[in-house]
Image: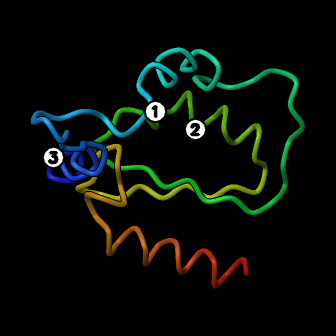
Amino acid sequence: SSGINAEYGENLVRQKGGGWSWRCNLPAIRDNVPHVKGYPDNVPVSDTPALFVYGGNSDYANAERIARTKELFSNSNYVEIKGAGHIVHMDQPEVFFDTLREFIEING
């Protein structure tokens, strides 16, 4: 999608001698994915208001993940943004920020 292309573009840097490189630390991301992927065990449940926004075109927010997240965040809200993929704020920025603004106004 155009949102993903824009996100990638923000992380590319033109080198002085020509060519491109990544601004982000790809080896660190690769090495730490196992530590941030999934859900931790033995964590306290949070009752703080929480908003989880997901794109309707993304398969990341499936029923299993939402159910587990609800276990960890007892006062959570889930909003599907239609026409958005995984990078919701890039694919549907106006809808995303309207959703966020409304949540903040309600939950202060």
The earlier-in-sequence mark between 3 and 2 is: 3
Residues at marks 1 and 2 touching, judged by CB atoms closer than 8 Å: yes
The earlier-in-sequence mark between 3 and 1 is: 3
Q: How far apart are marks 3 and 2 (CA)?
A: 24 Å
Q: Distance between the residues labelled 3 and 1?
A: 20 Å
Picture layout, residue 48 above or below residue 43? below
Which of the two residues, 42 or 4, is positioned nearer the viewer here? 4
**Which residue is labeled 1 in the image?**
62
**Which residue is labeled 3 in the image?**
1
Report x, y in % for residue 25.
Answer: 44, 30
Report x, y in % for residue 105.
Answer: 63, 85
Query: What secondary structure is marked by label 1?
Result: loop
Q: In this view, does 33 lie to the left or right of 17?
A: right
Residues at marks 3 and 1 touching, judged by CB atoms closer than 8 Å: no
**Which amino acid type corresponds to the residue marked 3 in the rendered image?**
Ser
Give the foreground label among 3 and 2.
Answer: 3
**Which amino acid type corresponds to the residue marked 2 in the rendered image?**
Ile
Picture layout, residue 95 above or below residue 21? below
**Which amino acid type corresponds to the residue marked 1 in the rendered image?**
Asn
Q: Is residue 55 left or right of residue 38?
A: left
Picture layout, residue 94 above or below residue 27? below
**Which residue is labeled 2 in the image?**
66
Q: Could you tell me which residue is drawn at 24 percent across and 33 percent down?
A: 21
Q: Could you tell me which residue is drawn at 28 percent across and 51 percent down?
A: 10
* Label 2 CA crowd tier, 10 Å (few <14, some 14–19, many 20+): some
* Label 1 CA crowd tier, 10 Å (few <14, some 14–19, many 20+): few
Q: Is residue 89 left or right of residue 27?
A: left
